[in-house]
Image: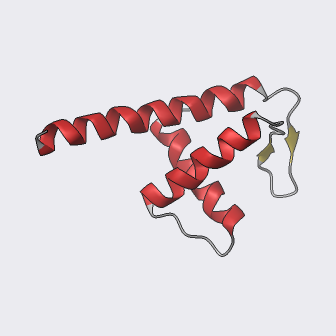
Amino acid sequence: MMAEERMERAAVLGVAVAEEARRLLRLHLRPAALGDDGKVVVDVPYPDAAVMTALLDVAADCFGERGASLEESRQAALEALLDLAGA
């Protein structure tokens, strides 16, 4: 497989991961609460929470997102994923 084809497949996979994250968030968006910092808080129940956690961990590694905590890394990855998905 040529490098160009691998990059194209990786891009398609990245968009698919972003779309799945957006789908899961939209599914559980109602009712959403506003956090103390003004951010929307979405409660994603199990088993979707396990999928969302895995997606965010992979995205954080892929995008090189590093925060002071695991949750901050996941939040940064979520923002990058939603940006990629056009949300």
- Residue at the far bottom in the pictured view: 68
Q: Position of residue 58 (x, y in %)?
A: 52, 52
Q: Position of residue 80 (x, y in %)?
A: 51, 49
Q: Is residue 60 visible?
A: yes
Relative to 31, is 74 above or below?
below
Residue at x 14% of width, y 45% of height: 3
Relative to 29, is 49 above or below?
below
- Residue at the far left in the pictured view: 2
Residue at x 34% of width, y 32% of height: 12
Q: Position of residue 22 (x, y in %)?
A: 61, 31
Left or right of 16? Residue 38 is right
Left or right of 49? Residue 77 is left
Locate the N terminus and report the quarter of the image it occupies: top left
Out of 61 and 39, give the one closest to the viewer: 61
Q: How many marks?
A: 0
Locate the C terminus and report the quarter of the image it occupies: top right
Residue at x 44% of width, y 57% of height: 63
Q: Is residue 86 visible?
A: no
Q: Position of residue 40 (x, y in %)?
A: 78, 43
Relative to 36, is 44 above or below?
above
* Location of residue 9 (image quadrant): top left
Left or right of 78? Residue 86 is left
Out of 36 and 7, give the one closest to the viewer: 7
Residue at x 53% of width, y 29% of height: 19
Query: What's the image's color scheme?
Result: secondary structure
